[in-house]
Structures are given as C-alpha cells and as structure tokens.
Image (cartoon, helix red, strand yellow):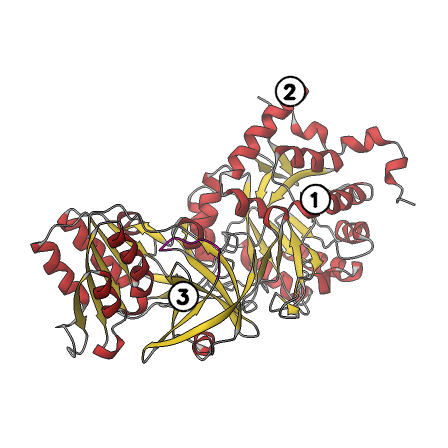
Amino acid sequence: MADLRVDLAGVALRNPFLLASGIWGESGESLKGVWAAGAGGVITKSIGREPRAGYPNPTVESYDRWGFLNAMGLPNPGIEEYPQEIAIARGAGALVVGSVFGHDADEFADLAERLAATGVAALELNLSCPHAEGLGAEVGSDPGAVEEICRAVVRRVRLPVIAKLTPNTHDIAALAVAAERAGAAAVSAINTVRGLSIDATLRRPTLSHGLGGLSGPAIKPVGLACVWQIYEKVRIPIVGVGGIGRAEDALEYVLAGARAVEVGTAVAFEGVGVFGRLARDLSSRLDALGVSRLSDLVGAAHRESGAGATAAAP
Amino acid sequence: MRRIVTVSERVVETPSTVTLRFTDPTPARPGQFVMVWVPGVDELPMSLAYAGDPKGITVKVMGEASGRIQSISPGTLLGVRGPYGNAFDLSPRRLLAVGGGSGTAVLAPAIEALVERGGDAVAALGATTASELLFADRLRDAGAVVHLATDDGSAGAPGFVTGVVEGLLRHQTFDAVWTCGPEVMMRKVVLAGRTAGIPTFCSVERWMKCGLGLCDACALGPYHVCIDGPVFPGETLLAAPGFSEFYRDASGRRRPYARPSAPGPAAHGP
C-alpha cells in the first residue's frame, strides 16, 4: 500500500484529503462524521466575530454533476459559540483546521488567536470568499492586503497559517508570494470562481445575492492552473482545491504542485463516504504506478514539462 | 433542475395555514419536500401536502417569508426544485399517524396513499384550538379514523395529542406509527411507541438552506435532514444528539426548543 501520509507545514496528515471550509462544518457532529469517514483533516466553516445568518435563500444553484453556484454569505455561529463544535470534533480525535474571515488584519488576528486557543492544528485564512462585501476576496485580491493580514496573524499565533487564495484575480501567484513573504506556512487554492445564474422566465438572478461562486468539477482546470502557477513562485506548501471528486483529480493536483487537497462539492454528490473512497483509490492508483509515497510526486509535472507549459497560451 | 410553476389555487385551511396548488410534472412520493422560491422573498423547504397532480404545499405563518408566501394569489410564478429527501414507507397494514399542528400537512398524502393500497389508518391530530385543526375532514374522506385533541379543549380531547396517542396505543394494535410536529411532541410519540413495541417514523422539520447536503444548516446529530431524512426511525432520533433539544438557526447557532410544547422553526415544512 502506498504511503498517503503528508506533512503539511509541520502538520502530519494521515492522508491528503481535507474537508473544504464551508461544506458541513457548522456542527461538531458533522465534522466528527467527516473525520470518522476517513478524511485527513477537517476545516471548519469560516468563523467571524458575530453570529452571521448569511444571505436569504436561494443561496445555491445546482448544475447537476458539474457543480454548484453558491452565495451563502459566510453564515457561521460566531467565535463565542463555535468552540463547543470544535470540542466535539476534537473529542473524537479529529484533526481540525480553523477557518476565519475578517474585514481587516486586526480582526483576522483576533479571531485567529481565539480559534487557536480551541486546540485546532492550523488556521486557514479566508481571503477568497467571492461574494461578501468588504470580506473574503474583496480584501484578498490585493497582494498588499494579503501580506498585511498574514503578517498580523503570524505574529499573534504559533500555529501554521494557511492563506486561502482567490482565483478571481489576474495574478494568483502574486497573492501566494505575498502570503509567503508575510510568513504564512502554506497557501490553499482555489476558492470558488465568481459566477452568475439568471432565470430567463423571471428575468432575474437566481441567487438572492446575485453573484456567487462556482465549485465542483467545472472548475478543476482553473484550480490546477492556479496551483501550477503558484508552485512556480513559492516554496511553501500548497493545498489544492477545486473539483476534486476522484483520486485521479487529487493526483493531478499533486503533480501540479499540491501537497494536500480539499474536497467540498463531492461531499454533496457522494456523501461523506467520498473520503474513504478517495484514500483507497489513490493508494491503489499509486501502487499501480509503482509509487510508494505520494509526497514524492508533489510538483512532478513541472519537472516533466520543460519551460513550455509554464508560458501562457498565445 | 429548478423549474418555474404557476400557482393555480389558494385555499385557506385554518386561520394560520394556507395551501397553494401548482402543476409540476416531476414525480414525488409522500413524505418528500421541495424547495419553493418566491422571487424577491426567500426560498423555503416545504413538505408536499399534495404529492400528485397538482402538487400542493401548506404554509403556516412562522416568519416574514412564510407570511408573504401565504398571501400569494393564483397566477403567481414560483421556483420549485426537488423533490428531495426520503418518503414514508407505505407498507404498514395498520397505521397510527400523529400530527401536531401543521405537521399533519406531510402526513396527509402519505395516509391517503396507504389507504389506497388497502391499509387501515387511524389519525390523531392535535392543535392549539379547534379552528387550527388541519385536514381532519380530508383524512376522514380518505377513510381514516380521526381522533382530535386541542390545547384549549375546544374540540376533541383537551390537552396534548400525545395523551390521545398513549390511549390508542394501549387499546389498539398498529404496525407502525408516523408522526410530524414539534420535536418535543415527536419525542413523546417515539417513547410511547417504544413502550408499546411499535416502530415509529418521524418527519423532522429543520432550518434548511441548500437542501442538497452541502451547507450543514439542517444538521441533526450525525445526520442531515435534507438528505438522510426528513423521515427518520424514532429510535434513530432518540440516539441523535440534539433531537428535541435544539435546532440551528440561519447562522448555525444552537437554539433551544421551548418546552413542554411549541412549534419548531418551520412547522410548515421539513
């Protein structure tokens, strides 16, 4: 059996498959269930200072097998009440990564400090939600802001800090470079891709917020390109996200430069059993390839490609 | 997946509940729910009070959105997606169905389907007062024996419907008990079923956003009402942390259920 264990910036993962932030993760029992199903770790909902209801419904548009467009609006129970949910997951032995969002560096740092006190293994900064005014990608598409926020958090917590980056920018690698310069231990890419759905009969957007973010198999090529570009510019580990539902998808992300991956939409398609299946399938796939350790393949496609693949298409 | 339907009929059922009917050819089974979008207002989970053609939802005023849905007139366009979730098992030969308030809405089409298949049904319906009893005539017309209870004693037995249920379980035999209503009520029904040695099945109502098993809003212990339910075996619920104790609001915060008996966050749908 191939070795799926990975070291993500000092955090030992039993396999590379993390629950992506925003999927389940409001309740400790759900996080516990994902861990029991075989995930390498679970990332919480993005937590803010206050309880936040999110946008009115409709918040999700389904495109059957190729993905979802969502604008949930960062609903979360708030930092006061959420630690009891983390305690349930940690009580079951889960490796929990805490996700936070904020308006500015101070708010990020405060929340990170409070979440760090709950015993999470690492922190992920949501610098990339595509549909929240003054939050997420609105602060996270400027390399200067990414650097300032990461620096403020790194100064306040001893845990590895993972900056989750947005693809809705012309140069995601510059964001990763900014995060690395500020001391972030890793970056994750990508969050959802900005999108819009319109109902032609009603002549209006279907989501209450209008704009949303696309997830699922449709965005895998976007995520792969972002991971590829980031890998060329930074030394810190990358967590690949976007359209991963098969072992082959994860393998592609690893070859592009990811050390671990996040799984979200596939949980809705397949249920929580997706985690155990992905780990088994990836292990079998590596055995068939004669690869004994997944981590040996990180970025391997760069070594095969020569200079050509790094250049933008004409 | 989402389709636009036209409201064909609006029926005032009780002072607090209204039924909206619409034609939607997507097949559904009794017990399932749909996500109903009122453009510009909200999109809410609604049990199908009529699962055939035309479909129907019975809306209880719980908040601003359900209030605005109630006032919708025939001709209004609605978005519908689903049906989602599981359905009632229609195989019991002799059924006891226990409806609390507007919870009867999801039981009614299932009782009709069970009787149509040759089953016998006894229904115990509870409400705050006589005028709020839902679908008693509809269930009698379907061939069910109907027992009533009201909090104020204005119709049927005075007090909670669970008192009626305990009496029925003592004196009659059933293959199964179905129930829908406030979780505190359903818990009592499940415990009464356990005492009588009869399996119970509960249709659970929780705050819901995506309906697709994605967002965690309807998390109930290790389950998600939208994909694992809305119908659960009673024993499963008794073992689920939080059942009848708290629900989660739109932010995911735990909110306790009032005791001894109060409507849930969305007593009109799952």
The dominant secondary structure in magenta is loop
> Residue shown at 44%/50% (left/top)?
B227
Q: Is residue A177 left or right of residue A156?
A: right
Q: Nearer the viewer, mark 3 or mark 1?
A: 3
Identify the image quadrant of residue B205. Answer: bottom left
Q: Is residue B25 magenta?
A: yes
Q: Earlier in the sequence, mark 2 or mark 1?
A: 1
Q: Quadrant of the C terminus of chain A?
A: top right
- Kind of residue at disc 1: Lys
- The one nearer the camera, B137 or A174, is B137
Rendering coords of residue A134 (x, y %): 68, 69
Which kind of residue does numbered mark 2 sit on?
Ala
Which residue in the protein does label 2 denote? A288
Q: Please provide percent x and percent y for residue A191.
A: 67, 53
| Residue depicted at 67% across the width and 19% down the height | A290
**Mark 3 Cα within 10 Å, few/some/many (few <14, many 20+)?**
many
Q: Are marks 2 and 3 on the same chain?
A: no
Q: Which chain does tag 3 point to? A: B
> Is residue B217 depicted above or below B128 in this figure?
above
Give the secondary structure at mark 2.
helix
Q: Separation of disc 2 and disc 1 at Cα?
A: 24 Å
B198 left or right, relative to B239 = left
Q: Position of residue B248 (x, y in %)?
A: 42, 62
Q: Is residue B41 above or below residue A171?
A: below
Q: Determine which residue is flagged by label 1.
A: A220
Per the image, the residue denoted by label 3 is: B56
Q: Report the span colored magenta.
A: B24-31
Q: CA distance from mark 2 to mark 3?
A: 54 Å
Q: Are marks 3 and 1 on the same chain?
A: no
